[in-house]
Amino acid sequence: MIDFASLANAGIRGLRAYDPGHDLVALRRAAPRPLLELGSNENPLGASPLAVRAAIAALAGAHVYPDPLGGDLKRTLADSLGVDNAGIVLGNGSHELLMQFAQVFAGPGDEVVASQYGFAVYALAAQAAGATLRLAPALPRDHAMPRGHDLDALRAAITPRTRLVYLANPNNPTGTWYSGAAFEAFLEAVPAEVLVVVDEAYAEFVDALEYASALPLLATHPNLIVTRTFSKAHALAGLRVGYALAHPHCIAVMERVRESFNVNAPGLAAAQASLADAAHLAASLDANRAQRQALAGALRARGLAVSPSQTNFLLVEFGDDTARVEAALLARGVILRPMGGYGLGDCLRITVGTQDDNARLLAALDEVLA
């Protein structure tokens, strides 16, 4: 028998595969009734009808390779965001791009800095590249942003060997955020040769007044990179379209490793059409805002600690009862995301659903907690 692990690169040998939480396909097949899936932060209102029609129309050309440059989508993004078209690279979801930044800019002997409770992919990216991961401690549990990014700690974790810093605003899985002013001060303190990757996968959901996207800082900070996705607010998770914005010279280097035709034709078409349907996006964001507030209030009324959130999910503490609650809800067809892999074994992450979804969740939860 070949020991394939021993043949892998050093970084891969110590790597653990990304944990999706549950085998959803198997659970769906076995379930006697439709599952209530609140573990993957999907948009329950679905994609824009314009996007769906565009994706279906693109299937007529399924025998033809998609545009390898994604030119039409990139031009639409450039116009809508006010950025240089040459400063955009497309990805098979932002996940692919987050991995590739480490592949391109870090390696053995280098360091990558991330927050203690940052998105799991940051650690995977560093390890796969063979770099050393330095985790900065998060804000304490009793902070106004419990377990959120501590920008001072992140800055202190940077050393002369640091090549990349990953952070998210808002953050997954905590739902927390930091102000635009705080981030700008942080960025000013980061050495110019250290690349700062800001993951804004949930940026569209934010309504906090102190929040600000990092996008306007791209013009004055060549070491800044911002990633976004069509999976969350635009509800195109099944089509896998993401993008990164950075200095054109940085993007030019990234293009050297971007896989040919990495975004499929239905995905390109749907993403571009979704950008044109501002009304559908606004309706999704309004519904999420209302249901996020209502669900958080209902959970707190049941005596549960709920972290503040500017996303489409809530991080909820269940204490020593977490594993039992998660299993009992699963037995009732309600799927939440266990957080043990993040070192948050006393918490579950709950996607904000529709009003009916949340009512079903709460009814099941009342049975479990009774």
Image (cartoon, rainbow, N blue to C red):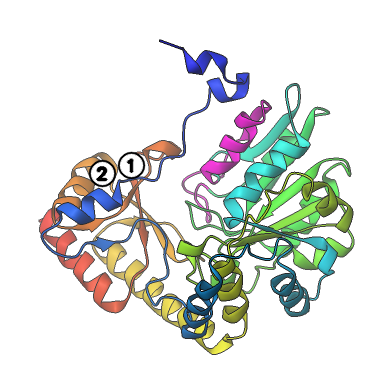
Identify the residue at horizontal 67%, vertical 48% (top origin).
Answer: 259
- Closest to the observer: 119 or 14? 14
Mark 1 element type? loop
Q: Given the image, on which type of amino acid does mark 1 rest?
A: Asp
State whether residue 137 appears in this view. no
Instruction: Name the element at disc 2.
Output: helix
User: Residue 182 sits in which quadrant?
Assistant: bottom right
Please, is residue 85 above or below residue 12 in the view? below
Q: Sequence-wise, which precedes: disc 1 or disc 2?
A: 2
Q: Badges 1 and 2: C-beta atoms under 8 Å apart? A: yes
Residue range (magenta)? 119-147
Q: x, y percentage for residue 111?
A: 72, 29
Q: Residue at x 53, y 13 (%)?
A: 6
Q: Mark 1, residues whose alpha carbon is within 10 Å: few (<14), some, or many (≥20)?
A: some
Residue type at the position of mark 2: Thr
Q: Is residue 367 left or right of residue 336?
A: left
Residue 66: % across, % down: 64, 64
Which residue lies under the disc numbered 1? 346
Outermost residue to the bottom: 279
State which quarter of the image contains the C terminus: bottom left
Disc number placed over residue 298 in the picture, else none: none
Residue that label 2 marks: 322
Q: Residue 315 placed where, x, y %?
A: 40, 54
Asked if 85 appears above or below 124 in the picture, the reply is: below
Vertical comparison of 146 with 231: above or below: above
Question: In percent of the image, x 15 and y 56: which residue is there?
Answer: 31
Q: Is residue 180 visible?
A: yes
Distance from Cα at disc 1 to Cα at disc 2? 5 Å
